[in-house]
Each structure stands twice: as C-alpha cells, then as structure tokens.
Amino acid sequence: MVKNKVLLRIENLKKYFPISGGLLSRRVGAVRAVDGISFDIKKGETLGLVGESGCGKSTTGRAILQLYKPSSGNVFFENTDLTKISTEELRQFRPKMQMIFQDPYTSLNPRHSVGKIIAEPLVIQGLMSKQQRKDQVAQLLELVGMNPAFMHRYPHEFSSGQRQRIGIARAISLNPSFIVCDEPISSLDVSIQAQVINLLQDLQEQFSLTYLFIAHDLSMVKHISHRIAVMYLGKIVEFAGGNALFNNPLHPYTQSLISAVPVPDPQVERKRHRIILEGEVPSPTNPPKGCVFSTRCPLAIDTCFLAPPEYREVQPEHFVACHRVRAG
C-alpha cells in the first residue's frame, strides 16, 4: 500500500556536464542533462520516470544517489539533504539506497562468482562473518527465484534474465528502503520482462521498497507505477498519477508518447489517432529559449518560443509545464 509519507524530495535538481575546448581546455559550454526538476517519492510507491533516450532519466537517478554530484539543487532523503553532507555521512546512507542497472551483463564483474558479486555490498559495509554472508547469499538467491547452488557459478553461465535477477539480489542485499531501477528490463526478451516486473513487485510488497522506475516503455510503466513523471530534454513536463496521466494527458509531448502505445484490440487500434512528432530533439548543450518542446510541438504559439512555461498544478496532484494548458 502506498503511504503518504514522503521518503525522497527533489528540489530544483540540476546536473550539467562541462564541455572543454581550445588549446587550454577551457570550459566552452555544458550539457544540461538535468535542468531544474522537482518532485517527491512517497514511501512504498513506485514512481515511473519516462521519456525518450537522452532526455536525462538515467542521469536523474544517478544524481539522486549522488553517483553524480549535482550541479545544484537539493536531494532530501529521510529529511537529510544528501547534497550537503560529507562523504563519510553519505556512506552511512548508502545501504538504504541501491540501484538496479540497465545491462545485467556489464554491471556484473565477469571474474567474480555470483556469490562474491551478491556478497560484495556486505563485505564493503563490514557486515556479517564469512559463513553468515554465504547463508545470506543463499537466501537472496532463493528470494529472486534462483537455486542457491548457483552462487559458485559466473555471470557468463546465465541468461540475461537470470543475470538481472542476480543484480536484483545484490541490490536488496543490504535491505535498502529505496532502489533506482534504471531501465531494468529494456535489454531483456519480452517473454522475460513480465517475470522481472512481477519479481520487483513481489519484493516491494515483501520489504516495503520504494522504487524510481526509469523506462521508455510506457505500457510497462503504467503497469508498475503509482505515479509517473514525463521528462523531455532535462525537464519534467508532466507529473500525475498513472491512471490520470493515461486517461487525461495534458502536455502535447505526453499525448504523443501515449498515442504510440499499441492497443491489443485491432479495431480500437485502427481508430486511434497517432501523433507523429516532426524534427529532431534539440541538443542539451543549446536548448530552446522558451519551452524545451516548442521546436517539435504541433500546438506551439509565439509565447512558447519566448518564455519557459511555469511548472504548476492544474488539477489535483496533476502538474504540467505548458502555456496552452489551463487550470481546472
């Protein structure tokens, strides 16, 4: 059950990557990967973060976990601002915040056995004896639906779905309260994706986990998420509950994304209106002056090219950044 207590609060988060050039390698610009976003994640919920490739989703997840040091903004985890604490203080929060990576093969050390991979966080944190860690690894493997005897094998001996289960086992080894799921199913076969999603939901219910679920597959995000944030070129353009977003998308970009989600009924699919966006996504090194979506928006007016829209609540718990959307 989703609780109202806020576990994580993001305020005006920015992450710019500097661009250097010239003989002296001076800074000549910046990639605005994340450009001033704000939202919260409630304890026990799954927040979906969707958008096209390169919009800043993965950078957002890494900046929240302080794997990337934010350029500015605040990240409050359990009312502690992670951007203001020391490295040693941050180390104390690490067990509570974990990550499941997109590629389950490159995120696992091929030279280490499965047992050593899953036990590594326990070793780093100095927890348990060697035998206790071995017992814990066996329990974790069982939790993710794998045979404990597999702890002596190596990553290359497993399928992509099994490797992702190993990555999940490693992520929950320290009993975290928050996990960033960075496109955890995008590299898996369609037949395996549902199994991994069901596993994540079962673990969430069993351990009261909170997820930031990053993906570009809207249909899967709708299935797993309680609320959804839509991101475009480093900014959140719409934020709402899953049903509200799909039943009443307000931002033109969200509308185009949802129109591309296939419907199983052929008759309904034939009658649907598909919104095809024209043009290319602008460069994050030089975003549009006004609304970041203005260069591709079919509804853009003069104001859209001149001033960025205010990100505001236009309906209860439904936020949008668009000049064309009226409150009410």
Image (tube, rainbow, N blue to C red):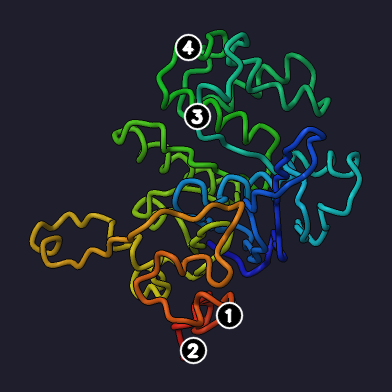
Name the one closer to the observer, 273 or 44. Answer: 273
Nearest to the observer: residue 284 or residue 238: 284
- What is the C-alpha distance between the residues marked 3 and 4? 13 Å
| Contact? badges 4 and 1 (CB < 8 Å) | no
The amino acid at mark 1 is Arg
On residue 327, which mark appears? 2
Label 1 SS: strand
Most distant residue in the bottom direction: 328
The reply, left or right, for residue 197 in relation to residue 303 is: left
Residue 156 has which mark?
4
Looking at the rendered structure, the kind of residue marked 4 is His
Image coords of residue 150 (percent x, y):
51, 13
Q: Amino acid at mark 2?
A: Ala
Q: Quadrant of residue 97?
A: top right
Q: Mark 1 or mark 3: which is in front?
A: 1
Q: Find disc 3 in the rendering and name its residue.
A: 103
Q: Residue at x 37, y 76 (%)?
A: 299
How far apart, in angstroms, are the residues tagged by discs 1 and 2? 9 Å
Q: Please tell me in which quadrant of the rendered image residue 68 appears.
A: top right
Q: Position of residue 292 (x, y in %)?
A: 52, 65
Disc 3 residue type?
Asp
Q: CA distance from mark 4 to mark 2?
A: 54 Å
Which numbered mark, 4 or 1, is in the foreground of this view?
1
